[in-house]
Image (spheres, rainbow, N blue to C red):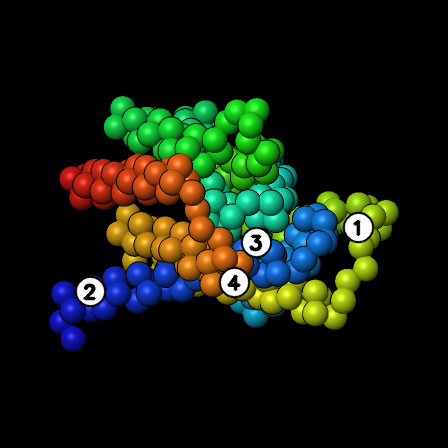
Amino acid sequence: MNAAEKKNDQYVRGAAMIVLSAFCFACMNVCVRLAGDIPSIQKSFFRNLVAAAAAGVLVWKNKEPLRVESKAYPALVLRCVAGTAGILCNFYAIDHLLIADASILNKLSPFFAVIFSLLLLKEKIAPFQAACVSVAFCGCLFIVKPGFENTEILPALAGVLGGLGAGLAYTMVRRLGTMGVKGPVIVFYFSLFSCLAVVPWIVLHFTPMTLRQQAVLLLAGLCAAGGQFSITAAYTYAPAKKISIYDYSQILFASALGFLLFGEIPDVYSMVGYVIIIAASCLMFFYNRAKATSI
């Protein structure tokens, strides 16, 4: 296999892994809904419990030190807090919106990451990137459908806040990466924090669950872990600028699963919002790729 064939093979593997991660996260969202009438906070606890265990095993296997330098503490704490808030909002949105709507709102996270990179990391935003962010938020309005007649305005806003929390969390992951903190260590601390943060609420407001519900929530955690490991593997095969666009296949999986399992059909406004957000993402993707190639 020559260099060109090897490079193409790496690209195909990376694309396949990121599509697999998208499928895993779509399945996680479906499992969250299938768990039934259980508080979103309780659902997030079980999801993060499995993720913490998986990350802990990976840290132990790779003999990664858990010690983090003091200068990284603020970024790590902000990553944990923002990520936890993002998951809670996302789970609430999943419970009250169409699976596809909740998924696409969570996919606003890259655009929020661009904004937080400007505000917190002082990274410059090109005018074209700013335009893409603005277009994406216009698409968001079609899904949220703001107005007093919309009974789903609160969960829709929660979905947007979920994307905001994830965007801030990813910005802090980038900051921690530049400080030399390993990915599995970040995931372990985040998952552990997310579990401990909701323990007081769980103790006071625990809702009894059937064996089926427990199994479904554990499956949600396994799907989430599978998504995390798959997307990590994807970026070891190929750079984000080449394969990140395939992450939006989650919307296709979410729409198909939502229709097959729950009979969900997005309305015209939501479909327009999907097209606008995905189009803005494609433009951002090709812009970043072209910019990286020209350097």
Q: Quadrant of the N terminus?
A: bottom left
- Farthest-out residue, right: 204
| Alpha carbon separation for disc pair 1 and 4 | 29 Å
Q: Which residue is mark 3?
A: 187
Q: Earlier in the sequence, mark 1 or mark 4?
A: 1
Q: Earlier in the sequence, mark 4 or mark 2?
A: 2
> Can you tell which quarter of the image residue 129 is in?
top left
Local crowd size for mark 2, using a 10 Å CA cut-off: few (<14), some (14–19), many (≥20): few
Which numbered circle lies on residue 14? none
| Alpha carbon separation for disc pair 3 and 4 | 31 Å
Residue 76 showing in the rendered view: no
Which secondary structure, mark 2? Answer: helix
Residue at the spot 55% in from the left edge and 45% down from the top edge: 97
Local crowd size for mark 3, using a 10 Å CA cut-off: few (<14), some (14–19), many (≥20): many
Q: Which residue is mark 1?
A: 202
Residue at the spot 67% in from the left edge and 57% down from the top edge: 36
* Residue type for callout 4: Leu
Q: Which residue is mark 4?
A: 261
Residues under numbered marks 3 and 4 in contact, where contact means CB atoms less than 8 Å apart:
no
Local crowd size for mark 1, using a 10 Å CA cut-off: few (<14), some (14–19), many (≥20): some
Residue at the spot 54% in from the left edge and 36% down from the top edge: 156
User: Residue 288's spot in the image, x, y percent?
Assistant: 26, 40
Q: Earlier in the sequence, mark 3 or mark 4?
A: 3
* Residue type for callout 3: Val
| Alpha carbon separation for disc pair 4 and 2 | 37 Å
Q: Which residue is mark 2?
A: 8
Which mark's residue is nearer the viewer, 4 or 2?
4
Which secondary structure, mark 4? Answer: helix
Q: Is residue 255 above or below residue 266?
A: below
User: Residue 204's spot in the image, x, y percent?
Assistant: 86, 47
